[in-house]
Amino acid sequence: MSLHLGRQVFGNPANAGKVLSKEEAYNLLNDWVKNPRLQLHVKQVAALMHAWAKEKENLSDADAWRWKLAGLLHDADWDQWPETHCRKIVEELEQRNIDAEIIHAIASHGPAHFGVEPQTKMDKMMYAFDELSGLIHAYSLMRPNGYEGMDVKGVKKRLKEKSFAANVSRDEINDACNRAGVTPDELIAFIIPRQAVVS
């Protein structure tokens, strides 16, 4: 089954700055995502996107919400429509005239799967957080104290174990870090404390 979207351009540049309100975003998420594990995953990625936008990019509250919105909705269609994953949420947001940059970040969060290259910093950080966030959460579930006391060394050890969270692509994590210009160590250290509060 190919999930390739078959295009590189999404949304309308004239819609720059147009977003869903918090209420609209969570209503869409709750309508589309019934799986509590997937709900947690997208909320964790959203929190990471928001934190990076504020702490590393020094963006305004409005721009940080754009980053968070992309994280919140990047897998919104995976639960009910896996065969049209990414395509359905992209088309939904295009119909709602949402900011093209947000839509592109969602469309490019898995270039090997959707055939869309990450271009902006928002795109690249979404790609970087998505896979690594999932692996770190899986690691927390096998630790007696969850995120408490988790460190970069422990996560890297799990990264080297191909059998652990085997569905998480190590190649994609490395590719994403390279594109974002961030080392895996730096990214892991950023994720652990911020993701812990959304667990």
Image (tube, rainbow, N blue to C red):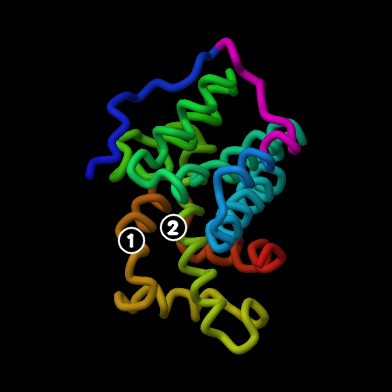
For the residue carrying disc 2, how many other residues have a C-alpha within 10 Å: few (<14), some (14-19), or many (20+)? many
Instruction: Tell me: residue 119, above or below residue 32.
Output: above
Looking at the image, which residue is at 70% across and 36% down? 59
3D distance between C-alphas at marks 1 and 2: 7 Å
Counting from the top left corner in percent of width and height, residue 111 is at 33, 41
**Residue drawn at (60%, 89%), measured in percent from left and top?**
144
Q: Residue at x 46, y 58 (%)?
A: 183
Residue labelled with disc 1: 169
**Quadrant into which the C terminus falls:** bottom right
Q: Dot 1, how many residues are within 10 Å of its Cα: few (below 14), some (14-19), or many (20+)? A: some
Residue identifier under label 2: 131
Q: Nearer the viewer, residue 181 or 43?
A: 43
Q: What stretch of residues is rendered in magenta?
A: 14-25
Query: What is the tally of numbered marks visible in this picture?
Result: 2
User: Is 46 covered by the magenta stretch?
Assistant: no
Position in image of residue 16 (x %, y %): 61, 18
Amino acid at pointer 2: Glu
Q: Nearer the viewer, residue 199 or 52?
A: 199
Q: Amino acid at mark 1?
A: Ser
Q: Position of residue 142 (x, y in %)?
A: 52, 83
Q: Are marks 1 and 2 in contact (CB under 8 Å)?
A: yes
- Could you tell me residue 2's position as x and y percent? 24, 41
Q: Residue at x 48, y 53 (%)?
A: 130
Q: Return the residue nearer the eye: 44 or 54.
A: 44
Drawn side of residue 185 relative to residue 116, left or right = right
